[in-house]
Image (tube, rainbow, N blue to C red):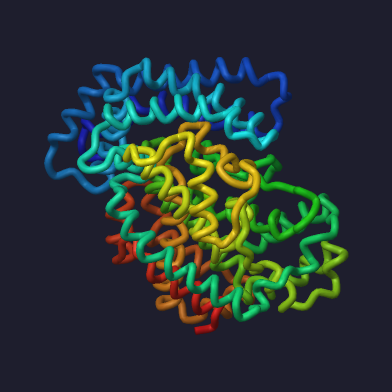
Amino acid sequence: MRFKNHVVNQILDAYKPMWSLNHAISLMGWDFETYMPTKGTEERGVADSQLQMLHKDLLLNKDFVGLVESAKKLEGLGDLEKGIVRVLDREITKQIKIPRELTQAESLERIRGNMAWRKAREKSDYMMYVSHLKKMIEIKKKIAEKIGYEKHPYDALLDSFEEGLTVADLDKVFGGLTPRIQKILKKLVDSGSPFCEESKLGKPKYDIQRVDELNHDILALLHYDMKRFRLDVSTHPFTERMGLNDVRITTRYEGTDFKKSISSTIHEAGHALYDLQCDKSLSVTPLEGGSSLALHESQSRFWENIVGRSLPFVQLIAPLIRKQVNFANHATDDELYLYFNNVKADYIRVDADEVTYNLHIALRYEIEKKIFGDELNISEIPEFWNDRMEHLLGVRPTRDSQGVLQDTHWSSGLFGYFPTYSLGNLISAIIASKMHKDLEDYEEDVKRGNFKPIREWLRLKIHQHGSVYAPKALLNNSLNEGYNPDYFVTYIETKYLGS
Ligand code: MG
């Protein structure tokens, strides 16, 4: 892509080696999670950190920083050009503000802390991990101070995952979301809703090879182009973009509860579509990725939940399920629908249904906010976690592995990340509401497997823009909304309570 402005063109030329390093780092990351022999870990660690350092050196190279600085002063730039400057300036500013010692301390603690967390989780013993958590929080507090913030130290960390996101935004989001979802959950449980009845379909062992075929069948139904995309297997499913024409996802096969594998596949495929439908002109530029983590998660959640767990979609894939999952061969469409949408207040976030999921995030948000506001002692976290979980979901963990030790995020320094999951859910409901108004035949189309209008709607409103616009701007421009929880609450009420 060439622009009118020659400074921007110079920036893009100088960016190419950085893009290439990212390309290699992504490919190595994908390989690490999928096919690398286990003993290769340490050497891969060396190669990865060396490439990251090279990338940082190129980014902070005086000439490059000078180019970006002079581009910031230019007038009359187009949206794409402004986007390039904004994205790079954000990256440079953050890297300059955080001293090398802190970056190194964090990456070292990430490895040590993660190892300690794994062992502690296995033994379900918070005390085995607490000193590492403490250290990581100290590092993150220092980083927050270096980055700077206006009101709350946690804002600095939130912004690094979701541009412009603040505690004030999230207080409003969860204030409007949490009590209403709790009420819906209570109604469902008290009324003995069929959604709360456990399905028999989750129990028996499935044939992994045939569910793998099933996943490929579903991806074919969703029109994925296997020349630009692939599906592999890993313990924790993820999406990795090497470039706009090589986007890879993984799924998981645990052997029982086949809906988890299908949902993971559709979730990651939703992430991939965001990248695959980015405008081709943004290839090999800093604008390739999506606008933000929340926007990305809105795409995966839209396909996983709003499409993937809807009745018309379940009806569409029901014949495929009956063919590949032998113990489901007499299941009716309604039984499958209830199986996919089973609601249960439980301990573990990653297994949560769409009704209870955000309550898990509300809990983590509350704790992180308190940690960085110096309102919660680190030794008190497990007790606080259990109290709040009992309040929010009505279940109290009896072991640390069911509570505070369940997620890997904190051990990897990911404070401020969790809220983007909830924002993704909220945005997916905003998208669905707006889309239904534009696409009259939406339900019929899903039932018939005609996903073109949906894909095209998403491409025009969201995907084509890559990260040209910051998340709040994109939401405003394309959906005329902000992080508004009302759409999600209405969606859940309508679907589960029929009101
Ligand atoms: Mg995701």
Image quarter where the N terminus lies is: top left
Numbered label tally: 0
Above or below — where is 149 with respect to 78? above
Q: Relative to 335, does residue 152 appear above or below in the rendering?
A: above
Give the vertical position of 357 relative to 161 (above or below): below
Q: Residue at x 66, y 37 (%)?
A: 124
Whether residue 2 is visible, yes or no, is: no
**Residue 250 against residue 319 in the figure, above or below:** above
- Left of 333 or right of it: where is 365? left
Q: Residue furthest right?
A: 326
Q: In this view of the protein, which residue sits in the foreground, 272 or 168? A: 168
Place of residue 72 in the rendered image (x, y in percent of width and height, measured from the top left) = 17, 35
Give the x, y percent position of residue 422.
45, 56
- Measuring 45% from the left and 55% from the top, which residue is drawn there? 362
- Image-based side of 94 in relation to 382, left or right: left
Residue 124 vs residue 492, the one in the foreground? 124
Residue 421 at what x, y percent from top left?
47, 52
The residue that appears at 20% across and 37% down in the rendered structure is: 5
Residue drawn at point x = 32 percent, y = 44 percent: 163
| Side of 372 relative to 214 (left or right) | left
> Residue 10 sits in which quadrant?
top left
Residue sitting farthest toward the bottom? 499
Question: Is residue 443 something one can see in this rendering?
Answer: yes
Residue 266, position as x, y percentages in the image: 62, 57
Q: Quadrant of residue 477?
A: bottom left
